[in-house]
Image: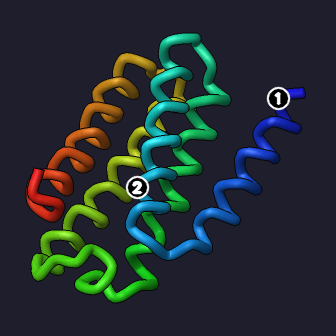
Amino acid sequence: MKKVILALVATASLSMANDTTIDATMSLMKQGMEKINNGFMYNSKEDVKSGLSIIENANSIFKTVDVKEFTKSEKVQVARNINKNLSKEIKALKKAIEAGKYADATSEYSKVMGNCISCHTIIRGW
């Protein structure tokens, strides 16, 4: 049953990833973060992995679009740096989850969230 749900989430995420708008991308990232958070709260390694996959797919859009046009911001290099850092932190979080180091994973999750906040603060003017 979990595999079916994961397959549905992955399919939905990939189809939404084709929508190259900032709103669709941020919605996917929010879904991924919520899924990871629920995974931690309910001891579900599968939910954490699923959430990471959603964020990873959403984050990949920044490699294929004109970042200036996509974000409606002149701060292109900052957006690229955040994208690069987010990719690195996602990998570290995956590694910690795979190793069963959940305390380390929560620290990495905090770094992922930090990238979100950086983007919202700098690029989106929060």
Q: 36 or 21: nearer the eye?
A: 21
Which residue corresponds to the image point at 41% horizontal and 79% vertical from the top-left? Answer: 63
Left or right: 85 with respect to 73? right
* Marks 2/1: CA–CA distance: 25 Å
Identified at 27% across, 32% down, the residue is 110
What is the crowding at mark 1: few (fewer than 14 residues within 10 Å), some, or many (at least 20)?
A: few
Q: Please determine whether, in this image, residue 8 is positioned above or below residue 71.
A: above
Residue 5 drawn at (x, y percent): 81, 36
Residue beneath disc 2 = 26
The answer to whether residue 76 is left or right of residue 31 is left
Q: Position of residue 40 (x, y in %)?
A: 49, 18
The residue depicted at 47 percent of the width and 69 percent of the height is 60
Q: Amino acid at mark 1?
A: Lys
Q: Quadrant of residue 21?
A: bottom left
Note whether 79 is above or below 110 in the view shown: below
Q: Which residue is mark 1?
A: 2
Quarter of the picture containing the N terminus is top right
Contact, mark 2 vs mark 1 (Cβ under 8 Å): no
Q: Position of residue 33 (x, y in %)?
A: 44, 37
Q: How many marks?
A: 2
Secondary structure at badge 1 equals helix
Furthest toward the top, the residue is 42
